[in-house]
Image (cartoon, rainbow, N blue to C red):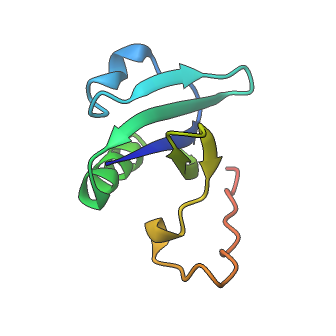
Amino acid sequence: MAVYEIRVKGHLDGRWSEWFDGLQISNSENGVAVLSGEIVDQAALHGVLNKVRDLNLALISVTSVDPDQQEPAISRALIGWPSSRTLPRVTVKKN
């Protein structure tokens, strides 16, 4: 089981937590909502990301968090990118 932080553009009411499989929702002043918590495996992570897509939320980032250090670290395993290579840049296009 891994801990993730998923950042999306916009704010979400805390009542969405149950729909997002119990992830905690926090909204920042800069207009970003953070979904955080334990996700059991990659299939469950993809399920949460599908829900983000279904709500038409702009995905900003997905971060694996080391529960011991509580510091975000981009998970290369998420996208199957070899650890010796640089991650591709992702940009969010504004409408």
Q: Position of residue 43 (x, y in %)?
A: 25, 59
Q: Position of residue 57 (x, y in %)?
A: 49, 42
Q: Is residue 58 above or below residue 19?
A: below
Q: Is residue 28 above or below residue 39?
A: above
User: Image point 70% across, 51% down: which residue?
Assistant: 94
Name the side, left or right, on which 94 lies relative to 53.
right
Q: How many marks?
A: 0
User: Image point 41% across, 34% down: which residue?
Assistant: 37
Q: Is residue 91 above or below residue 73?
A: below
Between 89 and 36, the one nearer to me in the picture:
36
Name the side, left or right, on which 89 lies relative to 66.
right
Q: Position of residue 68 (x, y in %)?
A: 53, 39
Q: Quadrant of residue 14?
A: top left
User: Image point 70% across, 79% down: which residue?
Assistant: 86
Q: Quadrant of residue 13?
A: top left
Q: Position of residue 71 (x, y in %)?
A: 64, 42
Name the side, left or right, on which 56 lies relative to 95.
left
User: Image point 32% across, 57% down: which residue?
Assistant: 46
Name the side, left or right, on which 85 lies relative to 23.
right
